[in-house]
Each structure stands twice: as structure tokens, then as C-alpha cells.
Image (cartoon, rainbow, N blue to C red):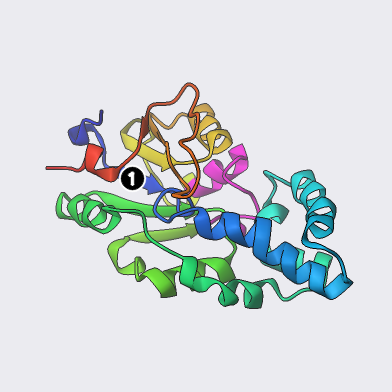
Amino acid sequence: MINWAQINTIFLDMDGTLLDLNFDTYFWRKHLPQRYAEKHSLTLTEAQEQLFPRFLSVEGTINWYCLDYWTRELALDIPLLKQEVKHLIDVHPHVTEFLQALREQGKHVVLVTNAHMKSLELKMEQTQLAGHLDTIICAHDFGQPKEAQAFWQQLQHKLPFSTEHTLLIDDSLPVLRSARQYGIGHLLAVQKPDSQAPRKDVEEFEAISSFLEIMPV
């Protein structure tokens, strides 16, 4: 699936790719609505009916990923609420071995995430993955999400890379399409970003269900 001799740089998404998306799914669909319901004397269903359209209205923008934005919008301490369920943060199987193998081969291993800095810090603290990465890129530093061409342009300026020799692994189809438009030559989707959900339809992209499938040897 991957000819590693052709790859110098690997861009890896965090949520759903390296980490189980179950934490984020549970937080945004259950835990946050429950806390919102308690604050406003609503049922969980009523809170979800109010919140989900608001989430959808900014999906794919930098605000969707911004914890400070949602703290202001909902008058709830979102980072603190994430701390309440941090025990759900988990690394996908074989991720650590995969990262070690890449670095042993001298590849440049880069985390590229839309996650807000406060969420990124919490997850790195919980997983200790930072030590297995060469560079961590947070989209909020650019003010643009990975869905935008401006993100890749700014990334190229900050961290020059050869599109022809770069691989992106991501669970987001809009992000993969944006990277393809920018010219990144090697793209892989993730079939099961959430361990508690069914396999995802990855449409036109090649995909992996386990990092064992592409482990460098």
C-alpha cells in the first residue's frame, strides 16, 4: 500500500487517526450536552436538540475546533469539562510501534491537528505520544483548519516539505480532499476512527483499519 522508499515526511492527524475518536464523540454528543442540560434545567435530549445545530453551523471552520470559542458561546468551561472524562482518551492499537518504526527509518514524523491547544496538551499529557513525534503542528497557530488551502500554504512556509514525497494519514475526508488539492502525493484514510462506531465509508480514498497494515519493515 505504501512504498516507504518514496516517503520522507509523514503528516499524521491526531483525533481518530492516532487516538480513538470515542473520547471526542462521547464528549460532544453526551458529556457536554449533559452539563449544558444541568446548567439550563433541560433534559439531555433537549440540550442535544439545541446544541447539535450550533455545532453543525461551524463544522469545518477553526471555530468548531476552538475550545475558547465554545467556552464563550456556551458559558461553560470546556477544557475543565474535558478533564472530567479524560480517562476515555486512548491511543489506537499499534500506534506507538508505528511511530517508532518511522523514526528508526529516519522519516520526519509530524502531528498535524485541528485540535485546540488546550485539547492537544491534555491528550499529549494522557498519552505521552509527543516523545514519538518530531514536530507538532496546531492549526490554531495558523488561524486556519486543515480543510482550508491556506493551512497547507502556511504549513509549507513553516515546515518546507516535498508534496511528492509526503504522506498524510487522516480520518477526515474533507481534510484529505484539501490535502489532495494542495498536491500532497500520498493519502490514506482511517476506516475505524472510533472504536465504538461502525467502520467509516472512506469513499474514494485508500484506507487502513490498523497501522499493522503499513508498518515499515
Residue 66 within the segment the image draws in magenta: no
- Quarter of the picture holding the N terminus: top left
Q: Relative to the observer, which residue lies in front, 87 or 56? A: 87
Foreground: 70 or 109?
70
State yes or no: residue 147 in magenta. yes
* Residue range highlighted in magenta: 138-155
Q: Which residue is drawn at 34% across and 38% down?
A: 209
Residue at x-position 79% and y-position 45%: 57
**123 versus 14 height, above or below:** below
- The answer to whether 111 is drawn above or below residue 152 in the figure is below
Residue 18 higher or lower than 3, as above or below: below
Q: The residue tagged with tag 1: helix, strand or loop? A: strand
Find residue 182 and report its horizontal and vertical position in percent.
Answer: 51, 31
Residue 111 position within the rendered picture, expressed as x and y whole percent measured from the top left: 41, 55
**Amino acid type for the residue under numbered disc 1:** Ile
Residue marked by disc 1: 10
Q: For mark 1, does the 10 Å Cα neighbourhood hold few (<14), some (14 to 19), or many (20 or more) residues? A: many
Left or right, 97 with reference to 164: left
